[in-house]
Amino acid sequence: MNRRKTRRTFQPRFFLFLALSVALVVGIVLLSSAAVDYFEERKKQSELNLPVSASASPEAGSQDGTPGQTSAVARKQRLSMDAKYPVTGSEKDGLESAVRVNNEDKIRDAAPREMGLALINKDAYTDMTGVITFGSGPYRDSFAFGTATVTLKSMQITWQAIVGKLGEYAGTSWTGQPLLVKWKPEVLPTLGVSDVYKNTEDFIEVIYPSADGNIYFFDLLSGGQTRQPIPVGISLFGTASLDPEGRPMLYVGAGLMKKNARGTEVSYYYAINLISNKVEYEFGGRDYFAYRNKWNAFDSSPLIINDTLIQPSEGGVIYFVTLRTKYDPEKGTISITPGDRVKYRYTGTNYNANDNAGKRWYGFESSPAVFRNYLFINDNGGHLQCIDTDTLKLLYAVDLGGDTDASPVLEEDGAAGTLYVYTASQTNVQASDLPAGWGYATMKKINALTGQVVWSKDRISYVGNGSYKSGCRATPHVGRGNISNLLICAFSGAGIPVVDESGAVSSYTYGGRLVAFDKADGTVVWSIETDGSADYVSSPLVVYTDRGDGYLIACDRSGKVNLYDAATGGMALCSSLDLGGRIDSTPAAFGNYFVVGTTGKGADGTETSPKIYCIKVE
């Protein structure tokens, strides 16, 4: 029997169904694989609260408390935008500026060329994971990376390491903030770390210069030494900075002067090669362009923008040095070949080369803050200076009321379409309306684009004996999340009133103070007072949860570390630790962990063992 062959005809709907089925199966496989990768990475990173994306660069909480992320692609797109933004302020309060290139005879009124140092915003500075300079970046507005999970509201020491002494200085000093960095996978194999860490992509490296003349390196979680200490041979007081492009080069300055081979007192800034673990280059010496050239130490933490080092000095000069960095990750080499040193200096009415009573003196100890093509810095004579980074011309200056070592902190206000800068001064002048030995430290909120003071608040502080100035040496914290209305300041030598039987203030006693000001008008929201041994030069650290709840970590000179609910301050002391040694340094946090060092002095001034501590917030 003959069967007739039948040709089966497939309808278009069949092919559509087949394509959708294949796509669905492939999607499920890919999604499953991605889910496995996701949860594996979350498992590794859970203790540090890292973002899942290795290229993401979250803040410690945005204005509304939601952590933000910035991809490298978005960062490059922003860098290609026009970075100009109008500053209309022009009042210079008697200050004048000048520029010199290298040691040439010619003194200029501006840079010889456009410097090309503009930033769109703080996210354009780096896409590195961690805290890589003082205050994290160009706004100097956070000492923490990522967010913390806070449930028990307690703290525990996870590890500690003993450091040494050099001359009369030991441990870590002011500002003394450590750096905490998770190196990029392509950089890690080139680093001069021990083999175990070359094969550990998730480790966070703690980098901590010390007053004993060494730079120390630790694993944040275990406390193990990631590499041997690098000896520099001079006390390092300030905070180092890493190359923001992720290249393994570290920059740190000497806190003291030393004699060179000719017997001249000099001070240097050092570029440290983190592949060879050796000093790659020294900047500095004695600069006769500086009005205060007999003291030229470097306490400021620099910024590196467009491969140009921006480094202020205590001599009153800001150095702009093209580094010409060459990094070859395949060969495992890095070097710099610095070009011209373009130098900015200033002078003004009643300025003096030394700290004389009633006079202002030259120098920068604060770290520079940068917004677009404008640099903001506080000087030792008590002025906030706004400098155009294209021309290196002084645009305006604001009198801050006294020597200001604390760094300016920047805050963008998108709703108002403006930028604010917050400053806090020390106390070095006797006030005519106060008892002998007492003066005022001044907090200011300034419109950074106009130079106009939004509000100014004075706090009574001890004038000091000339060797130590009280007031606000700590850099303020501009709140975010649930404390977005607060500016938190820490004071040393705060005047605590003594009230007589009639209710009048009869005198003041010396103590410490934490104060939260309302950012809108400067009124005090809360204040915490301590005794004289527990004052503050360490800057307040605030860690934020995923919800934006802020927790304040305050380290004082009696050796105490206190954890507060930042919204309510003294009404909510959550936990306290006693480290047994004076704390002058500012802590830095990565997720739930923070690191801080002690000075080698006890609360009573006697010697103690200087240490570096890692503490976990739980």
Image: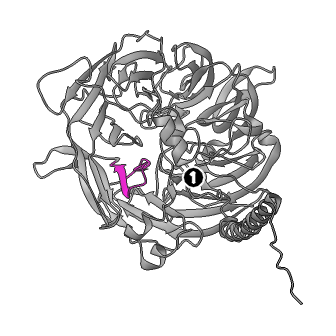
Q: Which residues are magenta?
A: 236-254
In the image, residue 238 lies in the stretch drawn in magenta: yes
Q: Nearer the viewer, residue 401 or 581?
A: 401
Is 59 situated left or right of 327 in this image?
A: right
Magenta stretch, overall SS: loop
* Relative to 351, residue 30 above or below: below
**Residue 135, visible in the rendered structure:** no
Q: Nearer the viewer, residue 415 or 107?
A: 415
The answer to whether 428 is drawn above or below residue 165 in the figure is above
Residue 553 on the magenta span: no
What residue does disc 1 label? 588
Q: Residue at x 50, y 38 (%)?
A: 77
Relative image position of residue 436 (x, y in whole percent): 55, 23
Q: Position of residue 608 (x, y in %)?
A: 51, 63
User: Residue drawn 55% across and 12% down?
Assistant: 452
> Which residue occupies the extreme front position in the image?
1
Q: Residues within 10 Å of mark 1 (few under 14, many from 20)?
A: many
